[in-house]
Image: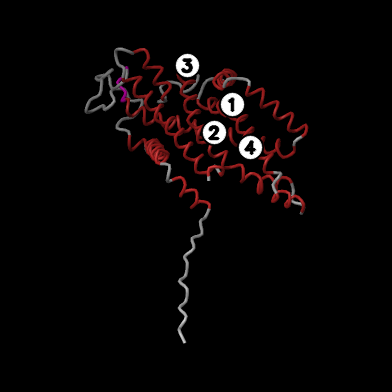
Amino acid sequence: MSATLPEPAVATTIRTPIGEFWRRFRRQRVALIAGLIILLIILAAVFAPFVAPFEPATPDYDNILEGSSALHWLGTDAYGRDVLSRIIWGGRVSLMVGFLSVALGAGVGVAIGLISGFFGGWVDGVLMRLMDVLLAFPGIILAIGVVALLGPGIDNVIYAIAVFSVPVFSRLVRGSTLALKQTLYVQAARSIGVKAPLLMLRHILPGAMPGVIVYASLRLGTSILTAASLSFIGLGARPPSAEWGAMLSDGRSYLGVADHLTIFPGLAIFVIVLAFNLFGDGLRDALDQKLR
């Protein structure tokens, strides 16, 4: 009688949603590099008091409009202030405006999109027509109008950028809500008496969040660029605040004399906006169910 050998156990791997996302996202080499650049810029901004070699507003009248040197790596401006230090501190302002404006715009837009898509009817008609009015204006023109009404300043720039972010988020979430509320699990939850607020928050919102996260990451670059544009024309950060758009505005008076005053702040804006766009593309590829 021959002995029966037990069959070898087959190892099974249970993938969590986060693990599956990371497995797909780590294949996006360019997005990983962009994420690392964003992380380094965020760390530099958070730890600016320890990273920046000089105070951003401290003048040095012995080194006015100095080019790159061992003491001032990126040179100095018309008041002798260190350009590298001002760029590092300016990252705090630009990132703060970007994150807060996108968070505010996404929060309001998601709420409007959920309500509009879920209830439909006249509620959908009224809310979407209001969003159409906002979408009729170019983003930068709408932001300038809001700042003109509220007055210049970083706080009002955040509100202005949030206002023109709301309609896009609302449209995005409304489309997802219209599709998700027809799914079987939402219909089943509704049939057993789940209330509308709980239905929207627990059963519909999680399904709409991947698109919101992807668009928010892309919107961060646009928000930073818009904030820099408003500061460039004098509607954003006020002197002597270190902000990339304001530094560009100050440096344009010295083109041909001290080009580093525009090159380096412009390069900082270019790098962070490009990094957020590439990172957002990687997130989209990792989260999009249709690409699986």
- Disc 1 to disc 4, C-alpha distance: 16 Å
- Disc 3 to disc 4, C-alpha distance: 33 Å
- Disc 1 to disc 3, C-alpha distance: 19 Å
Q: Earlier in the sequence, mark 1 or mark 4?
A: 1
Q: Is residue 80 magenta?
A: yes
Q: Where in the figure is residue 91, as x and y percent of width and height?
A: 41, 31
Is the Cβ of the residue at disc 1 closer than 8 Å to that at disc 3? Answer: no
Q: Residue at x 51, y 59 (%)?
A: 14
Read off the residue under disc 1: 164
Label 4 secondary element: helix
The label on residue 233 is 3
Q: Amino acid at mark 3?
A: Ile
Q: Earlier in the sequence, mark 2 or mark 4?
A: 2
Q: Amino acid at mark 2?
A: Val
Q: Amino acid at mark 4?
A: Val
Q: Is residue 52 left or right of residue 23?
A: left
Which mark is nearer the camera, 1 or 3?
1
- Disc 2 to disc 4, C-alpha distance: 15 Å
Q: Earlier in the sequence, mark 2 or mark 1?
A: 2
Read off the residue under disc 4: 173
Q: Quadrant of residue 117?
A: top right
Q: What is the span of residues highlighted in magenta in the rendered image?
A: 78-82
Q: Where in the figure is residue 82, as x and y percent of width and height?
A: 31, 25
Identify whether 3 is placed above or below 227.
below
Read off the residue under disc 2: 102
